[in-house]
Amino acid sequence: TDGSVSHTVEFYLGSEEDAEKINKDIKLLGFSTNPAKLKETQLIKGTRTANYKTWVVNKGGAFMRLMIALGIPIGRRTTQKASFPDWIFTTSKIAKREFLGGYMGGDGAVPLAYKRSGRKGSFKISLPDIEIHKAPEYVDSQIEYFNKLKLLFDEFEVKVNRIYTKIKNDDRTAVYVSFEKSKRNIQSLIETIGFRYCKEKQFKSQLILEFLKYRLQEINKRELHRKLILE
C-alpha cells in the first residue's frame, strides 16, 4: 500500500479488496468515491521479467484539501521535509491505533520466518526495520518524525529499539526504525496494531501470529511438565 498527492490524492493498493476498503472509509467521511482502476506494469531486469498489478484509488476536491490540512505530504516525500501530524496525539487510542496500522500497511515491513540452518523443524521469527529514504537536508526531519512515531508505539507497548541512518549515496540517506525483535514484541505488534489496507501483509502476519501462539503454548506445556516433575 502506498499513496501520493499531486492534483488528486492517489492510493496504490495490492488488491481490489484493499481498494474497496479505502473507498469504504472515504464514504464514511462523507465523500463520494471513484471506482478503483487496475494498473498493470512490467519490470525487466536482465533475463528476469516481473509483472505487477496495482489498484489505484484517486480522489480530489474537498477530500484532497482535507488530507492536506491533516498533514499529508504533497509530491515526492524523498525531497521534502517530513512533518508528523501532531494532532494524532490528541485523539483517541482507537484513532492512534488506526494511524499506526495504516502506516504499517504502507511503509511497515511484515514479520518473516526463517528456517534455522542445521536445526530440523526450527524457525526464527524476525521483524525487518522500517526504511525511508530522504535527501540529506531532510534526514533530521525524518528522524524527528520517527521519534514521534515511537511515542505512539510506546502507548501500545510495542517497543522500538533504535532509530538510525545509513548513507546510500550522495543524494540519498536511509532512515530506519528498528523494533525489538523479541517474540512477545512481534506478537504485540501484530495483535495490537496490524496492517491496514494491505491484505497480503495482514495475511502473512496472521500466519506468523498463529505460529508464535503455538510456540508459546508449547513452551507453557514444557514448563508445566517441568514443575510437575520437580514436585
Image: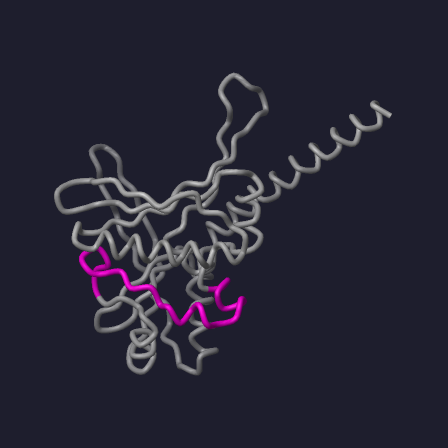
Compared across the picture, whether 143 is left or right of 15 comes to left
Q: Number of numbered discs present? A: 0
- For this orientation, the residue located farthest to the top is 118
Q: Quadrant of the N terminus?
A: bottom left
Q: Is residue 89 magenta?
A: yes
The region drawn magenta spans 75-98
Q: Measured along the vertical axis of the image, is residue 189 above or below residue 36?
A: above
Instruction: Name the residue rendered at 69%, 32% in the picture.
Output: 219
Between residue 203 and residue 190, name the one nearer to us.
190
- Left or right: 97 in relation to 62: right
Looking at this view, is 212 or 203 the one in front?
Answer: 212
Picture coordinates of residue 156, whole percent (x, y): 54, 56
| Image quarter of residue 65 | bottom left
Instruction: Judge whether residue 123 is colored magenta.
Output: no
Left or right of 127? Residue 171 is left
112 relative to 101, above or below: above
Q: Position of residue 201 (x, y in %)?
A: 46, 50
Where does the C terminus fall, quadrant-wise? Answer: top right
Q: Residue furthest right?
A: 231
Where residue 209 sits in the image (x, y, percent)? 58, 44
Residues 79 and 42: in front is 79
Q: Kindly give the residue lying farthest to the left in the view shown.
A: 170
Question: For this rendering, which residue is in front, 205 or 139?
Answer: 139
Seen at 40% across and 72% down, the residue is: 87
Residue drawn 16% across the image and 53% down it: 137
What percent of the width, then of the height, locates residue 81?
22, 61
Which image quadrant is residue 32 in?
bottom left
